[in-house]
Amino acid sequence: MDRSTPRSPSGGSTRAETGSREDRLKAALKANLARRKAQARARAGEDAGREAVNEDDNGQG
């Protein structure tokens, strides 16, 4: 982590910095959730495709 971020003279984070950090974390969380949902949808689609193929194989043999 980069610890060279500017601090207020009192040593704590300023409101703007805190808000900015919260905004970045919020955006990262939203992107992560969207990515995980897309992965889950893709996996569900793959599983459904495999089940259909397995049903076809069972009917022929």
Image (cartoon, rainbow, N blue to C red):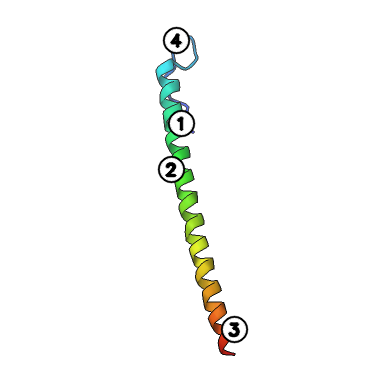
Secondary structure, mark 3, is: helix
Query: Residues at badges 2 and 4 in contact (C-beta under 8 Å)?
Result: no
For disc 4, the marked residue is 9
Labels 2 and 1: the sequence-earlier one: 1
Secondary structure, mark 2, is: helix
Query: Residues at badges 2 and 1 in contact (C-beta under 8 Å)?
Result: no
Q: Amino acid at mark 2?
A: Ala
As rendered, which of 19 and 39 lies closer to the eye?
Answer: 39
For disc 2, the marked residue is 31
Task: Tell me the crowding category of disc 1: few under 14, some 14 to 19, or many 20 or more residues within 10 angstroms, Cα based.
Answer: few
Q: Quadrant of residue 20?
A: top left
Give the answer, above or below, for where 7 lies relative to 61.
above
As rendered, which of 56 and 36 lies closer to the eye?
Answer: 56
Query: Taking 57 as reference, is 18 left or right?
Result: left
Residue at position x 42%, y 29% in the image? 23
Cα–Cα span, label 1 and label 4:
19 Å
Residue 60 in the image: x percent, y percent?
56, 89
**In front of the other: label 4 or label 3?**
3
For disc 3, the marked residue is 58
